[in-house]
Amino acid sequence: MFLQGYLPSILEGTILTLQVAVASLAVSVVLGLIGAMFKMAPSKPLVWLAELYSTLVRGVPDLVWMLLLFFGGQMLINDFCTRMGWQAPEINSFFAGVMTIGFIFGAYMTETFRGAIMAVPKGQMEAGLAYGMSPLRVFLRITFPQMVRFALPSFSNNWLVLVKSTALVSVIGLNDVMYRADTAKSITQEPFTVYAVVGLIFLAITSVSDFALKRLEKRYSLGVRETEL
Amino acid sequence: MIDFNLIVEKLPAFLGGTDGAPMMSTSDGLQLTLELLFLSLACGLLLAVPLALMRVSKNRVASSLVWLYTYVFRGTPLLVQLFIIYYGLSQFDWVRDSWAWEYLREAYACAILAFTLNTAAYTTEIIAGQIRNTHYGEIEAAKAMGMSKWLMMRRIVIPSALRRALPAYSNEVVMMMQSTSVAGLVTLADLTGVARRVFSDTYMPFEPFITVACFYLVLTFGFVWLFKLAERRWLAYLAPRKH
């Protein structure tokens, strides 16, 4: 039997990996939008804060952030709870993983969204405001649909890097595809086959995402003339 | 709250010495990280130039083979590539019986091999992109001077493409520097590996991980600065005009 029946277990791990990736993407988009708004805010401290966030996060490896936030966060929560006389809660590693990866990629998304928002002509937003739309409505109806086209190429790249980074979450104890592969490797004694399968799974995920995102890019670039040499 | 004494005490371990050095290497800590980085960047760049030429060549077979290589290596996590080489190769008896096994069973050599193949894939695409971007005037001028194809490649196309690849390559170098942190997951005591060791000895997460984070930050800024200098030197002709 192929991999002594460990394939379903690896596929189950893949589902968890995908869940982590999608949930972290959601967190990173929210953080990225907030970061982009801070970076373009009129208040200097907000700009510095966002600058600090994106510089610190991008200057340190993902793995180090994961270890620091996971183990450090756990210690902070434990300390806090003992001081308050509470029972320290068990930290859900899925939640911790999602928050950590979301936090890291929020910094990359900040740059993506900032560039994209700046690429939308200012007059568009001003016209929206002049019509009496609230700032939120201007963002949702005017800025957002137009910035997607500029944000997508870099967004796609961030997503592909994010998916590959989720391979690291087994380090903080998540039962993901890498963790399952580790178990399967020890039992089947076929490490090459196991990791080749994992590699193919990641390749499939990145290929499908790439294809879908390219389609989306086309969709959002409708009405924009392409230049060809 | 942060125990600075611990940081000071462990600093030599982070900087690296010969204590925990893996087989075939002379050091651990920061030195090991830099060793892994420079060896794999150097080998990766040497591989990438010919591969980039194959990638843009008219030979369909060569071009598709290189495309497949970069596609696979850019589409899968570095960690998986490292595990395939470090754990995976032992599955085959012919690998274990070969002369190469002496090296391939060492995490150090596996890490360098995996990092080299990974960075070569990204670098190939960066350089190939710049070769395609070469201005037609440069190529026509070279042809008009009567240069042979290889002379033109050697004297005109490659030097010009490598210069223009600098900004993208600087990103790749920083990415690769950060990626070397996964070496710790195959028993090597690079910067991150040392931090993990200190953490498991002391159960203090902040001191070791913030220390290595600072090391990586300094390295990142250092490389960004060095590449700025390099760009000012070699891309001066593309810089915006200063009055």
Image (cartoon, rainbow, N blue to C red):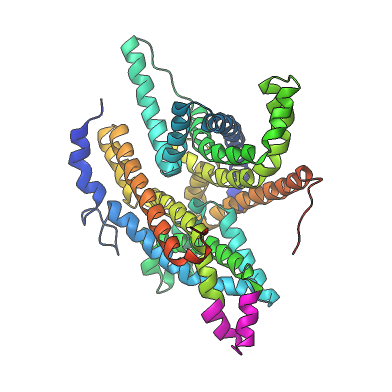
* Magenta-span inclusion, residue A165: no
Does residue B205 sit above or below B160 in this rendering? above
Quadrant assignment, res B152: bottom right
Does residue A210 sit above or below B119 in this rendering? above
* Magenta-span inclusion, residue B140: yes
| Residue B113 pos. (x, y %) | 44, 64
Residue B106 visible within the image: no
Does residue A88 sit above or below B27 in this rendering? above
Does residue A92 sit above or below A205 in this rendering? above
- Compared across the picture, whether B9 is left or right of A202 comes to left
Residue toward you, B152 or B71: B152
The residue furthest front is: B243
Residue toward you, A33 or B228: B228
Residue toward you, A150 or B209: A150
For image coordinates 60% across by 48% down, the residue present is A157
The residue furthest right is: A223
Q: Which corner quadrant holds the N terminus of chain B?
A: top left
Residue A11 visible within the image: yes
| Residue A205 pos. (x, y %) | 65, 47
| Residue A54 pos. (x, y %) | 47, 38
- Compared across the picture, whether B114 is left or right of B33 comes to right
For image coordinates 38% across by 65% down, the residue present is B39
Query: Bounds of the magenta span?
Result: B137-156
Please name the predominant secondary structure of the magenta segment in the image: helix
For image coordinates 77% across by 48% down, the residue present is A218
The residue furthest bottom is: B146
